[in-house]
Image: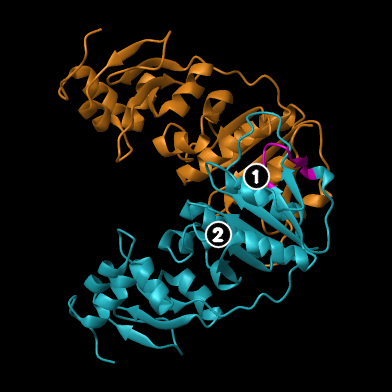
Chain colours: A cyan, B orange
């Protein structure tokens, strides 16, 4: 294809709109920057097109040469990037319900991305997010996942309904709370488990804590304050599939 | 004291310089924003002066009224703040060496702050950082600690020398690495332990991994990629003082 050189090009304008959630929701597409993330996306057939300037190291995938100015315009990195991938999320069915992560209103993109990365590292099967959780296709989330988002099904839906469904399917649903909760060491591992983490400021909503089978508390003896991605890491490791 | 109204006031200019590491190092002072962090600092006698506009909720501590424009100028929050504290770190001796955290070249302020918060939550005794670790008085670090930085001694020094000293004192020094390492479950808890975490991209430097008593690996069965603050959370919880 011919090199695109104009910032006013209709395609460029369309790609640039992918910085907006509305456009991502409408098209199912999003931008991914940098070689590492594009390589991860390629492993899972998630790349539609790669934009580059000069030489392109990627083969066997549609590529489109553009100018550096266009890459800079599309990049969310102030120092620019050599490659931008136009990607979609691979269709992934939830194959089993042995280990599930439930996220209630996580707001910080770094926390969401880190939790996704941790869930994949410990082989969790799926993630369900409340509708007010930060968008997984936000560029900061994508960066924090280090590419893990291509490897796990992630759904946005009503968590109360999801918890009720999981319980019907025999999944033991574990909330997290600092109050009225059982210490983690007293909660044995079970075949099918789901873990519910909450908003950075307010924790899991009370309404959801009522629906869980049990609520868990990480034992602390000092400050009683953990970042949600750290708390998630401790719990996801503790109950990882062996 | 009289209200300060000019952005050109010499004191205001001096406070504003505290955004620079050089000035913080020279004076031992730093800025803290928002009620929650100032309340934490007050608990540990770490506040020299509180700047406010209008009503001040803080009593029994030196206060200085300024204009909103001055608060905005000094604030690193785009939407401003109601209070700014001029603080120092409390002098804290390392009282015991039962649980120590060693940080080699952590770059991300959020990761450093989160690790400090986690160390305090699990009652660790001290943190030693390599000289190329991000400055603990960086405002993003302070925010991520949620105030935990007032509660634990934090030193910057040559980590190789520190590890050699700790070993002399009978502290079992545990490095972290993905390669040539022992899985965490095989490393029993000991009375005195130190844990060494490394840079986000490169991990712990090879030179330091040679000096430790053992190197630890968190068991993963998937993606083999954890954020350093999450890895730290899992390890610090696992070996917490009971």
Q: Is residue A148 left or right of residue A96?
A: left
Asked if both marks, 2 and 1, belong to the same chain, the answer given is no
Residue B233: mark: 1
Locate the C terminus of chain A by quadrant: bottom right
Q: Is residue B216 left or right of residue B232?
A: right
Q: Is residue A208 left or right of residue A156?
A: right
Quarter residue A29 falls in: bottom left
Residue drawn at the location 20% of the way across and 16% of the way down:
B4
Label 2 or label 1, whichever lies nearer to me, is 2
Q: Is residue A135 left or right of residue A231?
A: left
**How far from the left and from the top, in percent, is residue A38?**
46, 74
Where A44 falls versus B107 (above or below)? below
The residue furthest bottom is A1
Q: Nearer the viewer, residue B153 or B39?
A: B39
Residue A130: mark: 2
Which region is colored magenta?
A176-184
**Is disc 2 placed on a helix, strand or loop?**
loop
């Amino acid at each position: 294809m011919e090199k695109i050189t104009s910032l006013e090009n209709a395609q460029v304008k369309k790609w640039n709109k992918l910085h907006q959630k509305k456009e991502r929701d409408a098209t199912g597409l999003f931008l991914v920057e940098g070689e590492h993330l594009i390589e991860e996306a390629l492993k899972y057939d998630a790349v539609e097109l790669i934009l580059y300037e000069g030489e392109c190291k990627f083969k066997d995938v549609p590529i489109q040469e553009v100018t550096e100015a266009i890459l800079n315009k599309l990049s969310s990195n102030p120092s620019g990037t050599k490659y931008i991938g136009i990607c979609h999320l691979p269709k992934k069915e939830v194959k089993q319900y042995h280990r599930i992560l439930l996220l209630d209103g996580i707001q910080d993109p770094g926390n969401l991305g880190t939790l996704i990365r941790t869930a994949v590292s410990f082989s969790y099967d799926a993630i369900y997010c409340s509708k007010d959780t930060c968008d997984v296709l936000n560029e900061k989330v994508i960066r924090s996942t280090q590419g893990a988002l291509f490897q796990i099904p992630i759904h946005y839906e009503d968590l109360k309904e999801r918890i009720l469904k999981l319980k019907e399917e025999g999944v033991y649903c574990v909330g997290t709370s600092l109050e009225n909760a059982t210490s983690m060491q007293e909660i044995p591992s079970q075949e099918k488990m789901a873990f519910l983490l909450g908003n950075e400021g307010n924790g899991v909503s009370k309404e959801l804590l009522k629906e869980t089978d049990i609520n868990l508390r990480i034992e602390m003896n000092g400050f009683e304050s953990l970042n949600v991605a750290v708390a998630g890491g401790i719990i996801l490791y503790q109950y990882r599939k062996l």
